[in-house]
Amino acid sequence: MTTPKSEFLKTLSERGFIHQSSDLEGLDKLAADGRMIVYVGYDCTAPSLHIGHLLSIMMLRWLQQTGGGKPIALMGGGTTRVGDPSGKDETRVLRTIEEINANKDALKSVFEKFLRFGNQASDAMMVDNAEWLAPLNYIDFLRDVGRHFSVNRMLTMDSAKLRLEREQELSFIEFNYMLLQAYDFVELNRRYGCNVQMGGSDQWGNIVTGIDLGRRMGVKDQLYALTCPLLTTASGAKMGKTAAGAIWLNEAQLPAYDYWQFWRNTEDADVSRFLKLFTFLPLDEIAKLEKLSGSEINEAKKVLATEATALLHGRDKADAAAETARKTFEQGSLAVDLPTVELPRAEIEAGLGVLTAFVKAGLVASNSEARRQVQGGGLKVNDEAVTSDKASLSLADAAATGIIKLSLGKKKHVLLKPV
């Protein structure tokens, strides 16, 4: 299509959010009139969303910011009991209802930082699909919904096809997931007039299946699909995946400083793209930052880190993280705002093995990994290289400042505090 007329799709197009759409011109008309009612689903498989979910959350925020319509954050209290096979090589671990509910409660706080909730027409809603999925009668569901699905067609969907091609098991409960997701779309339309589903490109098959189910079940509204790309870094790595694990959005799982550091360590080739996707900086400001090269690009990375962190954790914590990094890396001084792990004073006084200390600090996953880092000169205590894996820490190491600084390489630091 030509340049979108709606501010919503124009913004998404300019910033690189759009991957696929069932009818972009139809969506553009809806958005121009402010008539989009859009949902994105989030299953409750962990106590925090991770950075892979952030793209769709940003799309919901832009929807609200541009006046394109109403966002719905759908919590998968029901679908999490089944498990989405999309992009997975193994069956997901089934969670108890208690675990799912606890995770759901923990996820809610993130959406409040990005979306405006309330009772106005454009205010966001949070809904749980357990409301309609949990009470379903299985036989009635098969007769009313299941009869509209072709197993032949379901087997061609990536969520099933890839698992089968690799000769990896696809359980019957997972095979039903696309039925439930499709039914979510129908139910959301009936209850709230929802007419658009957004998600990552790996959800395309499930989303268009929901559109087809709506047509077969007599939904009066035209339903639409819009997906964003699944991001990889310039080097081909999956976005948000690091050696230490996923980049979580809840501060309980990942401190604000570590979140800031993740963005600060962005590859040079990704800085411009991530500024467009993960900040609200105007495009003309981003264009100026795009011109920076050589060592100057580090300034653009700091802007990215601070703006992205401010959106999630607030401006004060973002600025504090930036200042901590400045003190640590530019001044070479000890920044007390670094991530801190408290350990019993008696444990350190008795002589805490340096390998164990780095594991307890979360800088390495195991003693063997710590030992390899020692051999490569990658571990430091109070900025002094660890030369022996037999070394131990004592209270004398905390004598000067009351804390012990542990470092992995040049960019990862944790303070051990005897208590």
Image (spheres, helix red, strand yellow):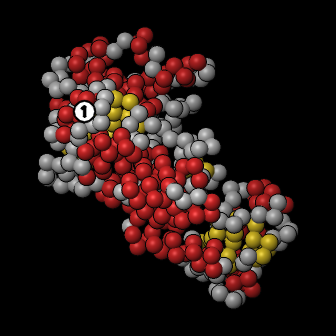
- Please report the residue visible at 81 percent of the width from the left and 57 percent of the height from the top: 372
The answer to whether any part of residue 119 appears in the image is yes
Quarter of the image where one finds residue 6: top left
Q: Nearer the viewer, residue 131 or 22?
A: 22
Look at the picture and state if 141 lies above or below 365: above
- Res 9 → quadrant: top left
Residue 342 picture quarter:
bottom right
Q: Indicate left or right for 235 with 170 as reference.
A: right
Q: Position of residue 157 (x, y in %)?
A: 45, 20
Instruction: Provide residue 319's location: percent of width, then percent of height.
Output: 45, 72
- 379 shown above or below 198: below
**Residue 260 on image: x %, y %:** 51, 63
Circle 1 SS class: helix
Say if 122 sits above or below 222 in the image: below
Q: Which residue is rendered at x = 80% and y = 72% of the image?
A: 385
Q: Residues within 10 Å of mark 1 (few under 14, many from 20)?
A: many
Residue 269: % across, % down: 57, 49
- Nearer-the-camera pick, 184 or 303: 303
Which residue is found at the position 51% from the left and 19% from the top? 161
The residue carrying mark 1 is 27
Q: Is residue 233 left or right of residue 23?
A: right
Relative to the observer, which residue lies in front, 19 or 207?
A: 19
Asked whether residue 42 appears in the rendered view, the answer is no
